[in-house]
Amino acid sequence: MDNSFNSIIEREQNSIYQTYKRLPIVIEKAEGCRIFSKNGEVYLDFLSGIAVNALGHSHPKIIEAIEEQIRKYMHVSNYFYQEPQIELAEILIKHSKLDKVFFSNSGTEANEAAIKLVRKWGNTINKTEIIAFSGGFHGRTYGALSIMDKPPYKDGMGPFLDNCKVIPLNDIYSLMENINSKTAAVVLEFIQGEGGVSQPTEEFIETIKELKSVHNFLLVADEIQTGIGRTGKMFGFEHFDIKPDIISMAKGMGGGLPLGGIIVSEELSKLWKQGNHGTTYGGNAVACRTGYVVIEALENGLLQQVQEIGDYLHNELVKIKNDFNSKVIEVRGRGLMKGLLLNFEAAILVKQLLERNVISNAASGNVLRIIPPLIVQKHEIDEFVSKTRDSLNNL
Ligand SMILES: Cc1ncc(COP(=O)(O)O)c(C=O)c1O
């Protein structure tokens, strides 16, 4: 078989549905914060599988957990009691202060579960509307798409769910105008990932909290990108004085294996009866074991490290902004979920960085999204910063 770069590209184009714009890299292996290409290049990975590889690539504890579990069993279905699911659920409950977990395989399925549960709750009390925010990203299934306003993801694929409204983020007037007694839920990312690392303001969250106490709706925190330590806290909502009723999770939770889920309040945990919702693979034992390893690492110092390294990165990014103030407008984000708002297309900087063997990502057009593995070290931040400076100098 011809394994040259060009042949692999050609075979991919001939065999895979062309829905992705891929980087020009054929992966050989990955370790820590590095990706090794088949043609011998070594890249610094500041994308981490789109905010997935919390412990980096091939972490020995993740490999050990996988090996240990696959020797016992991999998949048995949700007909059985599985200790890896229970252990992960217990540790998630401890951190979220909510009450019950439903496991899925991905983020969009987690949000699908959240939307179904919101409907189940709202239908009996005449609360039918779901409110979400402009720039939000919640996944690719119909429920998730129905609470998004991103045309390329929806073009020509309607009709979508009824009674879903997308209103501007951080527009308090719009909140007050649109939230009423019919509101069943507000779905919010505490930092919008795809939406350009945009954050809701304190005032905006306070208003949601006040309106919630008046109109009694559910708050769904989409923590699929912000959750599991990414922002320097276990969940993004912890940066604010508010408590969600449903948290949806995925990405970092599986430590590299596909895993998602929702954590819900005691009240909501009583609504679904057996058979109301389910999945064949959701809560796969191997993925739950790796998920447990990630949260254990966060508890054992990694969360603190994310805060410290995140602050260090933040300061370095602010210096970049000051030194390149004609090109960099703003530093955004928390912990290891950062963004640089540029006054040009971020894809141009992504390309420059790639030429310097750094993998990064453009979000929402003009934001460079910076989401390294949570185990990233200071010297790797320094390498990223110096190559970003070099790239900006070159533009
Ligand atoms: C905030 C948020 N919600 C939901 C999703 C969808 O997750 P998945 O791609 O696992 O379905 C994503 C993925 O990028 C996300 O960032």
Image: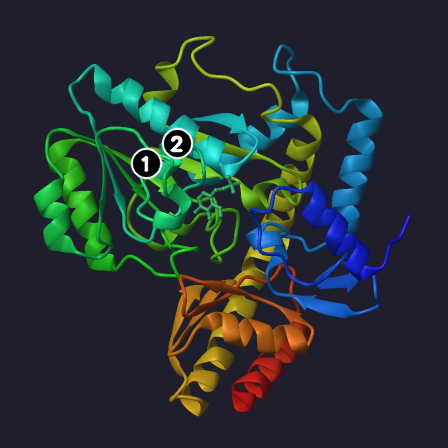
Q: Is residue 358 above or below residue 153?
A: below
Name the residue located 36 percent from the left edge and 23 percent from the top edge.
116
Tell whether 353 sits left or right of 362: right
Residue closest to the eye, 227 or 177: 177
Image coords of residue 225 (percent x, y): 48, 49
Q: Is residue 292 above or below residue 378?
A: above
Residue 29: tell me if it is visible. Answer: no
Q: Is residue 328 above or below residue 78?
A: below
Secondary structure at numbered mark 1: helix
Q: Amino acid at mark 1?
A: Ser
Where is mark 1, residue-wise? Answer: 146
Name the residue located 27 percent from the left edge and 20 percent from the top edge.
121
Name the residue located 66 percent from the left edge and 34 percent from the top edge.
287
Crowding at mark 1 (Cα within 10 Å: few <14, some 14-19, many 20+): many
Is the C-beta separation of discs 1 and 2 under 8 Å? Answer: yes
Where is mark 2, residue-wise? Answer: 142
Tell whether 98 sits left or right of 213: right
Residue closest to the eye, 241 or 113: 113
